[in-house]
Every structure is written in C-alpha cells, then in structure tokens.
Image (cartoon, rainbow, N blue to C red):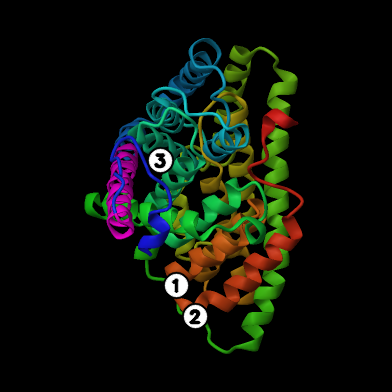
Amino acid sequence: MVYFFSFRKKEGFFPVPEKPLFLRGMAEMFRLALLGILVGGGVSFFVGLLGAGEIRVAEVPRIRMLLLPGALLFCTLLEERFFPGIAGHGMESLRRLSDNNKAFPPFAWLLKMVRTLVTLISGGSGGIVGPSAYMGGALFSAASSEKAFSRENLFCGAAGGVAAILGTPFGAALFVMESLGEKPLYRSFSLERFCRCFWCSFWSWKCTLWFSLVPHPHLNQFSPIPEKAPLFLLLCLGGGVFFGVLAVCHVLLLRHARRGMRLFWKNPYLRALAGAGLILSLHFLSEGHVCGTGQEDLGLYFHGQEGDALLRGFWKSLATGITVGAGGSAGMVGPTFFVGAMGGIFFAHLTGFPADLFALFGAAAVLGGAANTPVACTIFLVEICGFSALLPAMLLCGVAYLVGRRWNLFYREDTE
C-alpha cells in the first residue's frame, strides 16, 4: 500500500522530502490522514450547526414564512454581486471545477457552508452530501497550499466529505471517482487515486464518529436479507427496473423545475422571491414535509410507515429543484435518497418484504440510476448490510443504472 502513496512528491501543508520509498509513502499516508481528519471535523461542525439551527426554527415553524425569502435573496446576492460562479449544488460545482481545471475560490468551503446553512435552516429543500463533498474538496485543497489546480486534492477531499455523511469510506471513494471522472469507471479506474481517496475518507469518517454529530445509516438495525431465495432475487431484478424509472422521473423533475424557474423569472432577485413563495406553497400542500433535509420523515419511513410515499417523493423532488433554481444552495444526493426510500417503501408494501430493508435498497438503487454510479451504490449497501447484500445490490443498482444511464443527476447546467 505504501507504494501507491509515494508516487509524487507533495508540497504544501505537509511536504514530503526526497527520502526512501517507504519513508515517503508513510509521510504521505500521515499527511492524507491529517487532512482527512480536518475534512471530517469541518463537516461535523457544519452538521452540528445545521442541527442546532433546525431545532431553533422548529420551535417556531411559522418563522419560515419570513426567513425563506430573505435567505434566498441573501444567497442570490452573494452569487450575483460578490462571488460569481458559485451557483449549483455541491457535486455539480465540483464537476465544473474538475472539467475546467479551475482551482477553488478563496474561502470556498466557508462560503458553501454559510449558503447551505442559510438555505436549509430557513426552509429550503435539499441535502447535505453534495455541499459536504464540496466543502471537503475546498478544505483539502486549501490545507494543501497548492496554488495550481489539483484533481487529486479535489477527489480526496470530496471523498472525505461524502464518507463523513454516509459513513461508507469505500463507497465514498468509488462514488467520487464515478461521478466526477471524465470517463466511465471501468475505463478510468486508477488504483493510486482510489487508495488516496479511501485513506482520506476513512479518517474523515473516523473523525465524525469521534464527534458523534452525524447519524450514519450503518449504525441502524435493518431487517435481515433473505438468503438463497430465488423469489427475492427475481423481485430485486424487477425492482431495479422500477427504481430506474423512478430515478429518471426524479432527474427530469429536478432539471425541469430548475429550468422553469429561469424561464419564467429572468431577474435573479424576483426568481428568489418567487421560489420562496412556491416552496412555502408546497410546504402547505404536502402538510409540512418538503422543507429542510427530510431526515425526520426518512426515519419514519425506514420503520415501515407507508402513507402516500410516492407523493412525498414527488413533493421533495419538486421542492429541491425549485430551491436550487431560485438561487439556494442544497445537495441533490439527499433528496435522491429520500425519493428512493419512498419508492422502496411503496415497493415493499406491494411485495410483502421488509419495508426498512427495501427503503435502504431503493435509496441506493435510485442514486445509482440517477447519478450513474452503480458500483459505488452497490458498495454502499455492502458496507451497511454486509456481504449478504452483494448480489441483491448488484441486481438493483445495475439494472437501475441500465434504465437511467442516459440521464445524469450531476449534469452541468451551464452546458444546457
């Protein structure tokens, strides 16, 4: 392993001098571990602030009617007047930087954290995986003190941010490589890059465990997976088609909601006010289930609450698209998990299998189809449920990817 950490001489935060191969490799591993801990600490701080803010706002829920318009106007003002080029959710912004070989702007991690906190606490809809990945990449690059753009720093930091939220270091490394890579993973896989991303994400994940501020899914207890059951595997095959169609609908709804906001309201400030009004209307129509990250609702559905699951997923997709289209900062991975979990609950009640298990499977399968990341999502399920989930996960995520591969959740809006 030391061999893969000693290819290049690194300069900056922890310079690696010209020493024997073993010493250079150990120094690089130590450097990546410290930077991973830095990323994990930054993400834990962000999640802690978000949780505290949501608790405060929940005490007076009607205050969102006043907070949300001002929050979206504030985010729009930052983008239009002070920090141009920061639009989009976290993974989209990372992909733009990676494709254009551009370095992070100064204090990018702080700017992304403030904009996301303001958006989500005030009632905007979205997730925190994408913003955490962006903050991780920006923190890693800033601490490395490299003036030139480094794709390796971006990938390592982003993997650390994803692992800090999901608690799956192997899957986080593969997810970043699949979603931000220039080519499909089977054509662009680099063992050196994977080792670096995994090592950084591992220590980022460990850091979040020390702070105990991030509720990782692998800490929950899920129903056992039926072993050697042909009917179960056949249902997984059909479920892959269902979740793939759901992923396509989710991506198209997000994309058209964002385009619609720009089409009907050319002025960015009017767009922010209109977006706030639309989100608040959806909040009342959905009986208060679209604002924020949706973690509380997701927990209820993981324990088998059926209700109008698919309708809740529709509201969440629409509200997230409007939030980002109106100038807010929010992630797309969290809402995709939400939609997949809703679809999984619906599918489980049709088939009679455990609702909590299929909520987890549906969340991973829809993300695999929507983000075109089947390998990473398969590993997500294996890390959470164990190796017994390997074959069902391959069927679900693989088929969902085949159905939805023409559409991508992280499609760059500036190229449309």
SS type, badge 3: helix
**Badge 3 amino acid:** Gly
Q: Nearer the viewer, residue 271 or 394?
A: 394
Q: Secondary structure at mark 1?
A: helix
**Image: 337 above or below 70:** below
Quarter where residue 108 is shown: top left
What residue type is disc 1 on? Cys
Rounded to the nearest angstrom, the CA distance separating label 1 from label 2 is 7 Å
Residue bearing the label numbered 1:
385
Residue appearing at x 62%, y 63% in the figure: 346
Where residue 93 sits: x, y (%)?
56, 33
* Residue at point 31%, 39% (across, down): 42
Packing grade of label 3 (10 A; few <14, some 14-19, many >=20) is many
Q: Residues within 10 Å of mark 2 (few under 14, many from 20)?
A: some
The reply, left or right, for residue 399 in relation to residue 312 is: right
**Mark 3 lies on residue:** 136
Instruction: Look at discs 3 and 2 and give the one toward the viewer.
Output: 3
Amino acid type, mark 2: Ser
**Does the image show residue 248?**
yes
Q: Which numbered disc covers residue 233?
A: none
Point out the stretch of residues depicted in magenta. Answer: 20-48
